[in-house]
Amino acid sequence: MKRFLSGDEALAEGVRLARPQVISAYPITPQTVVVERLSEMVEDGSLAAEYVHVESEHSALSCAIGASATGARTFTATSSQGLLYMAECLTYASGGRFPIVMMNANRATALPWNIYGDQRDSLALLDHGWIQVYAENNQEALDLALMAYAVAEDPAVRTPVMVNLDGFALTHTYETVDVPAPEQADAFLPPYDGVGNRFDFDHPTNIGYSAGPEYNRYYKYWEHRDMMNAPAVIERVEARFAAVFGRRYSGMIETVACDDADFIIVTLGSTAGLVRSVIEQLRAEGVRVGLVRIRYLRPMPSALVVEALRGAKAVGVLEQDISFGAEGTVCTNVDAALHQAGVMMPTYNFVGGLGGDDISEAQVAGIFRVLQQAAEGADVPRVSFLGIDSPADVLGAEGGR
Amino acid sequence: MIEVLWHGRGGQGAFTAARLLGAAASLIDGRHALAFPSFGPERRGAPMRAFTKLADEPIGDRSAVARADYVVYLDDTLLGDEWADELKPGGLVLVNSVLAFHDPRILSIDADGMSAAVLGRPIPNTVFLGAISALCEHVRAEDVKEAIRQYMPPKLHAKNISLVDAARELVERLSCDGAFGSACSEADGAPHAGAADSERSESAAAESVDRTIDRFVALAGAPQPPRPDGCAIPTLRCDELQPEKYARSTCYEAGFLVAKNAGWRNVRPVVDRVACTGCLECYMHCPDGTIYKVDADFDDAVGASTGADATEVDGAKPKRRRPALVAVDYDFCKGCGVCAKVCRFEAIAMVSEREALASERTADAPTAVEGSAATAGIAFASNASEQAKGADAR
Amino acid sequence: MAVNARTIADDEFFFGHKACAGCGGSLAVRAALKVLGPNAVAALPAGCMSAVGFNFPQLSFANNAMITPFAATASVLTGIEVGLRAQGKKPDDCTVVGFAGDGGTADIGIQALSGAIDRNDDVLYICYDNEAYMNTGIQKSSLTPFGAKTTTTPVGANARGCLTQKKNLFEIVAAHGIPYAATASVGYLNDFIRKVERARDIEGTRYIHVIAPCPTGWGRAEDEMVDMAKDIVDCGLWYLAEYEGEQLSGQPGGRFHLSRNPKEFGSVEAYLRSQGRFKALTDEDIAVVEAARDAKWEVMQREWQG
């Protein structure tokens, strides 16, 4: 059924279709609408779940962990400081291999206090053992809520999934979304049984114990190995999803016009939509430009990114994040992928959209022009901030003249 | 590099000794040392290790010492069959013991006795600092004393320094006597503790001032009857652990045990079943769940065999005066003594592990022991031996 | 059926652990689980009991049990309870029970505990109070009593141990209007067992605060653990009481009740002087402690007799 929904609402619809049995969450802008909608669904009986009004994000995730340890399907949602506040519990969930799905509304982290979108929150926690996926639009947000459970609960993966939606750009922006029928969703997503990782009254278990130096490494090794199984599982899940719902996703990454592109922008989330429209304009002018949208940043689809970038003259990584004293985290990951493959090409990091700052089409066009000039030998800074010191600002403005 | 491996029990001062040794050996400019404990979940009383590394250059390797020049045992009950595996060729074991070990690679020092005489309590660690300073040219006696002055509270300086001197004198004397030495064959494995040694006899005589303990010692060898059938309890397993199975979640079979706690104690509770009234205070208050109620049928059988405390006879079956008695799980008892303390009937006493083990050997032999209490103990032994075999087979 | 020494189950659900010899906390956990039975599901945060009880491959709980993040005992309990209930998998005799230490309860865990009581989740929370962070080696918590020496409240020229008073957690919990709360001591084990049994059969959130001495941290011989737990009650520095919420007591605001109301107290001085941690207290300090005890009892004896 077609409906005009915000990203938060679309995601909540996806969660309803996934039939979690326990939802524990604490409100924070811009995630709040998700928990409001879910509360209403539980109240009106359209979602048969226990909704727990926890007193903090730390308790939200730890409650979900306790519920998952009983074999229940669980959901929670947070954002920014809330994600940081529950950070301790992230590693309990991933190390314990509890297939919890969490929505994170990407938002700036304090100080200064700021409620608007950027991706510093989830990227700061990239190494906490969760699968991280970034939605581009509200339809994808809804669909990911369903697919995330299928991936997380797959016995080959058994790893929690964080579904990231750009704060406001997605969470509070309305667009038309197709909401599938519950029967379709049930056909796609079987119930979770948790066998092998839950309490059992016939054969009691001890869960979440400690493991000393001689054992610990094996847990970490298998945590890594099983997350590396995710790409193959995601491919299968998306194929099944397409068969049931008729919508096909592109796997770990999505590429736009990369095959013959000289200049490519790599980015996450809703910014990709902006880059798409600039690509159309520049292609019309005969500039061969392309886009790589990384959908899943963990596990890192290194080989796919390299294949998409191969042959480009220069690459720009556009991200709403900065790892202070270094560069953007996405850029570091892209560089590592190129290095691993022995592919050498110039990459430039464009940091923008911090604290909800808009990125303009002109700036994106400017980034492509910077890449062009760099390929022609111009001196271009490795890391630049849009709206402050980036050559993309000037070149973008010229381009728009 | 000189490596020293310290074995002790939590609370015995093994790490303090490791630290003082490191401090002493690095007082001279250009000398380097590391000292660190093994840091595990085990608590006070549990076997633990500490390490000291000494060298003339900075030490980069901060990992545990596997084979050492000196292996020190602050408690001789920790010296197991594999002791030689931890020794470098030419290395020496130093053990706090009144026993003689008849192996030139083992130097036995009664550090408890020496320290108790000086400190009023057996705190054996500084004795071994003195001993090592006499044995190892990297460690000078004056540096050990300076380390004591720098790192121990002032009121302990004089006494511990005198212990260092006493230990040095002893080691030097034993060395002259050729009582030990590292240039020896590595042919045999376990050392033979000289149980009949004269030192040992003296020590036993010293302890025998109050021999009310004797009746408990005589009972100490009795194997224990089994726990009641069908009782839910964590149990020892020997399953092979495969990482690809266990390490893909942190969820495992409840109550899966791989190690006993018996090595924690040097005293054990012994129950005198005749004095026991079956009040169960010991059972209730045991922090480790190692005291358990004995199956009533089993009691009856014992009662019949001793006849000592059967008060009435109901048909052919003698009925016991007491409805319940207790036994001790010595695989997991830590020897805390709470049971003996809460017993209002003097029916439990703490017996030294050494005496208990000796008594166990006696109990295994089919010789009669005086006294009805002891007879009851033997009855337990014979009755339970089959159960014990069954448990081993599992 | 009343649980006592004769009727209590032979089962040992907490066994083979690495707690110190003579540990009061392990006695509290052992005794409670024997009362709650095989279908109890236990959750323990960081602390002595989880550190000594869950070391793969030495897993010392015979029943379903798990470790929780330090601050999250109560919220994990909630998750377990709702998870079982939502799936229709909760046996009738299943108690979801938490065991947290004094620091895990009164300090870092108090927020989650308050949240669970607010929601009246159907869980039993047992705080084993050994009056300091013993797992990390004896540091002050908000339940460390005045005058106690810990490694973070040292005795020196400028201070004589802990300068703050023990937080009154029992009454803080009761102020939530919880259905049932109680204080206990492993030195009065039958009273503790009776309260666990009572709590087991009440629906909603229940809280039991049990004194569980740590011989290592308190500075007394390990075989005297039970004596310490008796002495603290006998001298009046701890009390055995119950709080029944409105539903249980039928009284607006609920009702406090002393389980033990001694005619006279043992010596506070003897209690304090018997433990290494109070060594530095002066006679004046002890008089202050005694006066505080008398003031507290004056109120309790007046108001908690219902």
Image: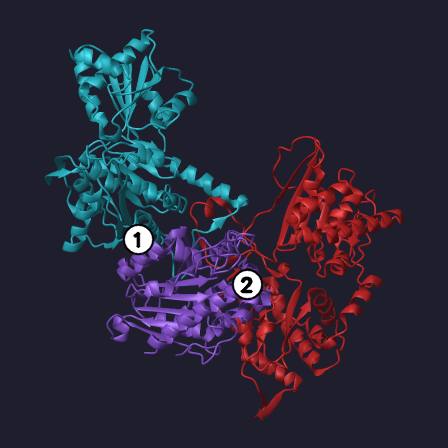
Chain colours: A cyan, B red, C purple
Q: Looking at the image, which residue is at 70% across and 61% down?
A: B121
Indicate which disc residue B91 carries.
Answer: none
Task: Say what amino acid the circle numbered 2 marks.
Answer: Thr
Pointer 1 local density, CA inside 10 Å: few below 14, some 14–19, many at least 20: many
Which labelled disc corresponds to residue C282? Answer: 2
Quadrant placement of the N terminus of chain A: top left
The Cα atoms of the two marked residues, 1 and 2, are separated by 57 Å
Which residue lies most toward the front here?
Answer: C284
Q: Position of residue C65 (x, y in %)?
A: 42, 58
Q: Return the residue nearer the eye: B19 or B165.
A: B165
Residue C73 on image: x %, y %:
38, 56
Residue at image mark 1: A72
State the quadrant of the C terminus of chain A: top left
Residue A316 visible in this rendered orientation of the protein: yes
- Residue B389 placed where, x, y %? 63, 66
**Residue B360 location in percent, x, y?**
71, 68
Identified by mark 1, the residue type is Ala
- Between circles 1 and 2, the one closer to the viewer is 2
Relative height, residue C106 to residue B328 (above, below): above
> Is residue A303 rendered to the left or right of residue B394?
left
Q: With A159 as the anchor, is B114 left or right in this view?
A: right
Which one is in front, A88 or A94? A88
Q: Chain of mark 2?
A: C
Q: Residues within 10 Å of mark 2 (few under 14, many from 20)?
A: few
Residue at far right of view: B177
Q: Nearer the viewer, residue A2 or C184?
A: C184
| Same chain, labels 1 and 2 | no
